């Protein structure tokens, strides 16, 4: 969940200028060719054309600013149904939704959690997991994503 503040600011400025919201940034370095994944959103959702326009814009900005050394592939996409949660405000915004969380440092010997997001209390993510309320330190959250929930189907079961 930790993001380079300079890279995030460069991208946020360019993405917002295109009328989109910067949801978050993932950078996966690799000696030969890293991956820079940029998630964008709009009030009306994201189209392929939105991704292409934003990709072209931020590609030019990244060429000029050059915040990442070496070669990398730029990928611009919508957050999707399993939307990643990057910022504290995301954990507030999606209170009530099911999420999966991976911690960078285990809590009581456990790194992976899934349950209903109850929001934030101070610097902790509150999660209802296995009938208990857990308090997960936000600073330890390495990755968090919504779990899509679908209505209908057989006897209330989730569709996959």
Image (cartoon, grey):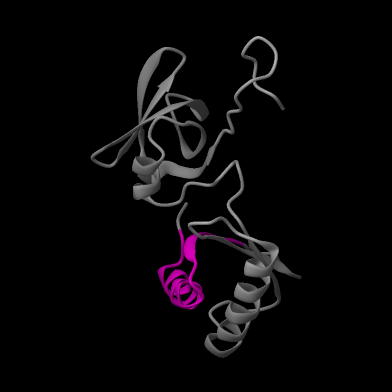
Q: Quadrant of residue 129?
A: top left
Q: Position of residue 64 (x, y in %)?
A: 56, 90
Q: Residue at x 48, y 57 (%)?
A: 43
Q: x, y (%) of residue 80?
A: 61, 48
- Residue 67 percent coordinates (x, y): 53, 79
Looking at the image, is 141 positioned above or below residue 44? above
Horizontally, residue 138 falls left or right of residue 81, namely left
Q: Quadrant of the C terminus?
A: top right
Front residue of 120 and 17: 17
58 versus 22 height, above or below: below
Does the magenta run of residues contain 92?
no
Q: Is residue 56 above or below residue 127?
A: below
Residue furthest to the top in view is 155
The structure residue drawn at horizontal position 48% and vertical position 63%, both measured from the top left corner, is 22
Between residues 86 and 95, which one lies in front from this camera angle?
95
Which stretch appears magenta? 3-27
């Amino acid at each position: 969940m930790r993001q380079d503040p300079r890279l995030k600011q460069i991208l946020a400025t360019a993405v917002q200028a295109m009328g989109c919201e910067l949801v978050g940034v993932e950078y996966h370095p690799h000696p030969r060719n890293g991956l820079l994944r940029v998630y964008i959103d709009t009030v009306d959702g994201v189209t392929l054309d939105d991704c292409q326009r934003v990709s072209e814009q931020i590609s030019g900005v990244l060429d000029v600013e050059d915040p990442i050394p070496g070669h990398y592939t730029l990928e611009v996409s919508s957050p999707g149904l399993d939307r990643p949660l990057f910022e504290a405000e995301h954990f507030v915004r999606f209170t009530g939704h099911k999420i999966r969380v991976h911690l960078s440092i285990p809590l009581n010997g456990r790194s992976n959690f899934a349950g209903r997001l109850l929001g934030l209390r101070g610097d902790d993510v509150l999660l209802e997991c296995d009938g208990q309320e857990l308090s997960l330190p936000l600073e330890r959250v390495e990755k968090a994503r919504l779990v899509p929930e679908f209505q209908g189907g057989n006897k209330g079961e989730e569709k996959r």
